[in-house]
């Protein structure tokens, strides 16, 4: 059945298809966008009409990297529950990190993910990152060509790669494959056993510090390597102000590098660790306030290309421990868009009252946030960005920023509940997602 979305705010570059208020109608037929106009009339009687007033319609969101527990830790998250969670959050594609209990380092492991995509009733696609090294152990390269032929999105261990000899060899071998290489810059020997970003707040709270040098030393090394071997690389999990500076310098030299920050690092910093909430334990750790501000500015000016979710599910028992004993990471696929929207797009008086949501110094345009979660992640992955234009595939997300709801185990599709917003009321929710010629309502 064809569907007509009426009078939604359209996040499109084409001014001709929207009215004076930025709203318009969109006709979807047979999985494609058939028409866009300020107003569409004379539609057939059997068409489904969707009231888009007050809602925002844009290309489907794409997450660069997240993880499930499957295989091996399905009590945390299965691949199917990850798909459902992603769809509920507006994501039509999710890059699946390889470092599960059984590492995605073989053709068979890639094939199992692709088979799950085909069989799933949830049409959000999991795009499999293949491990760079066997077992993600950083000692021996995987069979890169075979993994590309099997359908690997690109290569990352999802962990720091500190073997510099192997790093050089990887860049040389990967050069002709034209697939993204994603690196997490972190020198583990420098980071040591730290659990919070080094600074006044970590010292005051008695938390072992992680120096920013642990990140910047590794990043500077990566950038020097791609001067010698100019292979496009993606920098994951940027978390410090100095890293933003290094990336700005690299881009001014036209080095082939893109970068992403995880959404939690835009909303929190070390001031938020007062209650020692284990759901705020991350790796890399939350930055100091100056780091967070630099990261926000980096997204605005394009030095940081995209925002990643880095959905990291854990069981209740794993996270209900002391801060220093908690595994790092939190879920986010269903929460990122509404919470980022409230922090950076909505006016301050429309905040939910949640103390963890900062009031930013600069208000973003809706399209800025949307591009950082959709178009730009696609570009980082070497994928064709989704478009809200006639003839394009209907890979779309409809978002209602007015909708109030409570974050509970019943309202989330994820099996995991490790989030600092647990049992809190938030504003904004995805109402529909179109993907792979299907539609899902939330």
Image (cartoon, helix red, strand yellow):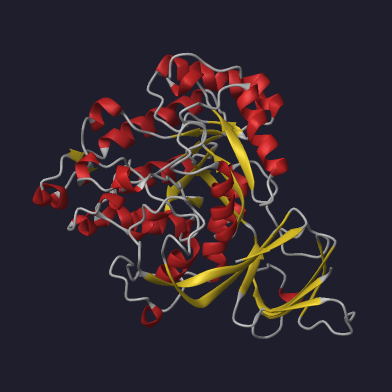
Q: Is residue 16 above or below residue 89?
A: below
Depth check, front residue: 123 or 288: 123
Indicate the position of residue 7 as horizontal and vertical percent values: 69, 82
Instruction: Please tell me how many numbered marks the rendered image carries.
Output: 0
Question: Is residue 37 at least partly visible in the picture?
Answer: yes
Which quadrant of the structure image shows residue 325? top left
Indicate the position of residue 198 as horizontal and vertical percent values: 19, 43
Depth check, front residue: 391 or 321: 321
Q: Left or right: where does residue 362 sit relative to residue 2?
A: left
Q: Left or right: where does residue 73 sit relative to residue 25?
A: left
* Residue located at (38% from left, 34% from top): 185
* Residue located at (47% from left, 20% from top): 135
The C terminus - image quarter: bottom right
Indicate the position of residue 125 as horizontal and vertical percent values: 65, 46
Depth check, front residue: 117 or 292: 117
* Residue located at (71% from left, 83% from top): 19
Which quadrant of the structure image shows residue 107? top right
Question: Is residue 178 at least partly visible in the picture?
Answer: no
* Residue located at (62% from left, 40% from top): 127
Q: Left or right: where does residue 234 sit relative to residue 209?
A: right
Indicate the position of residue 376 as horizontal and vertical percent values: 58, 52
Q: Is residue 132 above or below residue 273?
A: above
The N terminus - image quarter: bottom right
């Amino acid at each position: 059945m064809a569907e007509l979305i009426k009078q939604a705010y359209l996040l499109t570059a084409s001014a001709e298809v929207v009215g004076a208020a930025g709203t318009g109608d969109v006709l979807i037929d047979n999985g494609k966008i058939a028409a866009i106009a300020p107003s569409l009339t004379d539609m057939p009687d059997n068409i489904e009409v969707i009231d888009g007033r007050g809602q925002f319609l844009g290309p489907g969101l794409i997450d660069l990297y997240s993880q499930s527990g499957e295989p091996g830790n399905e009590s945390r998250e299965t691949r199917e529950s990850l798909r459902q969670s992603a769809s509920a959050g507006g994501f039509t594609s999710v890059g699946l990190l390889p470092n599960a209990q059984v590492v995605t380092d073989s053709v068979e492991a890639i094939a199992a993910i692709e088979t799950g995509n085909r069989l799933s009733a949830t049409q959000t696609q999991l795009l499999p990152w293949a491990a760079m090294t066997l077992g993600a152990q950083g000692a021996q390269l995987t069979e890169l060509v075979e993994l590309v032929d099997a359908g690997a999105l690109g290569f990352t261990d999802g962990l720091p790669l500190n073997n510099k000899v192997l790093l050089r060899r990887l860049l040389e071998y990967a050069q002709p494959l034209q697939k993204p290489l994603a690196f997490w810059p972190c020198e583990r020997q420098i980071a040591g056993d730290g659990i919070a970003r080094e600074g006044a707040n970590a010292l005051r709270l008695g938390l072992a510090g992680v120096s920013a040098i642990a990140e910047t030393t590794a990043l500077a090394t990566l950038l020097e390597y791609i001067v010698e071997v100019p292979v496009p690389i993606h920098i994951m999990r940027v978390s410090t102000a100095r890293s933003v500076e290094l990336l700005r310098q690299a881009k001014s030299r036209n080095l082939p590098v893109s970068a992403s920050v995880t959404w939690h690092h835009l909303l929190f910093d070390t001031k938020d660790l007062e209650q020692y909430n284990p759901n705020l334990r991350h790796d890399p750790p939350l930055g100091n306030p100056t780091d967070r501000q630099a990261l926000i500015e980096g997204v605005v000016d394009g030095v940081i290309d995209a925002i990643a979710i880095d959905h990291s599910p854990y069981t209740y028992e794993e996270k209900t421990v002391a801060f220093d004993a908690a595994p790092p990471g939190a879920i986010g696929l269903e929460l990122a868009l509404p919470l980022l929207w409230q922090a950076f797009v909505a006016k301050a008086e429309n905040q939910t009252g949640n103390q963890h949501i900062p009031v930013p110094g600069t208000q973003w345009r809706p399209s800025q946030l949307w591009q950082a979660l959709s178009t730009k992640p696609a570009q980082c992955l070497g994928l064709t960005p989704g478009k809200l234009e006639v003839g394009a595939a209907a890979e779309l997300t409809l978002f209602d920023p007015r909708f109030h709801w409570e974050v509970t185990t019943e309202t989330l599709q994820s099996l995991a509940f490790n989030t600092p917003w647990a049992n809190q009321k938030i504003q904004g929710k995805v109402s529909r997602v179109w993907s792979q010629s299907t539609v899902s309502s939330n």
